[in-house]
Image (spheres, grey):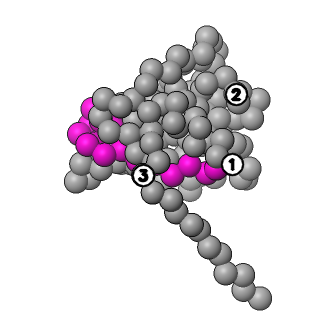
């Protein structure tokens, strides 16, 4: 799915939620913890934290006004006018409030502002595709993932 500049659609941020750029290890750990929980993964390690530090990727942390991590994601650093939005995650107890759409919109606009003429993402399923479509993304291609089991 892709969203060209100007095709994005406003998504209200739910009351009591804010989006911030992670600037400390505490923020990054909150972002990673929310992503790992949402994706059903083990808690993040120091190695995950080290990989999340620095770099040119655009990151956003969604949190409650009292600082509880809610979710987040990233837009890969713009290269040749292209950026990918990835890792959009919302902790299960905060789902279905529009937070995922607000995170996606924020990252998409930030990637466009950083010079991306093409911002794309790959939805994990139909539910995610509907969220991204509300933000302004449109399906341009389909991808089939195959896995070969080994014994």
Q: Which mark is residue 39?
A: 1
Residue 28, x across and y down, in percent = 53, 38
Which image quadrant for residue 58? top left
Q: Which residue is mark 3?
A: 140
State the residue at coordinates (67%, 23%).
Answer: 97
What is the C-alpha distance between the residues marked 2 and 3? 25 Å
Q: Identify the mark nearer the N-term, 1 or 2.
A: 1
Tag 2 secondary structure = loop
State the residue at coordinates (39%, 35%).
Answer: 108
Q: Quadrant of the C terminus?
A: bottom right
Tell me whether circle 3 and circle 1 mark residues in contact (CB < 8 Å).
no
- In this view, the residue in front, 80 or 72, is 80
Q: What range is drawn magenta here?
A: 110-125
What is the C-alpha distance between the residues marked 3 and 1? 25 Å
Tag 3 secondary structure = loop
Please determine whether, in this image, residue 56 is positioned above or below residue 13: below
Q: Which mark is residue 96?
A: 2
Residue 66 seen by the camera: yes
Residue 119, x across and y down, in percent = 36, 44
Camera-side mark, 2 or 3: 3
Residue 26, x across and y down, in percent = 56, 33
What is the C-alpha distance between the residues marked 1 and 2? 16 Å
């Amino acid at each position: 799915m892709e969203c060209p500049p100007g095709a994005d659609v406003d998504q209200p941020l739910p009351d009591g939620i804010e989006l911030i750029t992670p600037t400390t290890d505490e923020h990054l750990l909150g972002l990673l913890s929310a992503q790992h929980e949402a994706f059903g993964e083990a808690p993040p390690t120091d190695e995950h934290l080290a990989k999340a530090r620095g770099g040119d990727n655009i990151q956003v942390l969604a949190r409650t006004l009292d600082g509880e991590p809610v979710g987040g994601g990233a837009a890969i650093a713009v290269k040749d006018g292209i950026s990918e939005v990835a890792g959009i995650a919302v902790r299960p107890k905060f789902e279905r409030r529009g937070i995922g759409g607000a995170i996606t919109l924020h990252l998409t606009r930030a990637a466009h502002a950083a010079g991306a003429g093409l911002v794309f993402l790959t939805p994990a399923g139909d539910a995610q595709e509907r969220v991204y479509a509300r933000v302004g993304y449109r399906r341009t291609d389909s991808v089939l993932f195959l896995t070969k089991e080994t014994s």
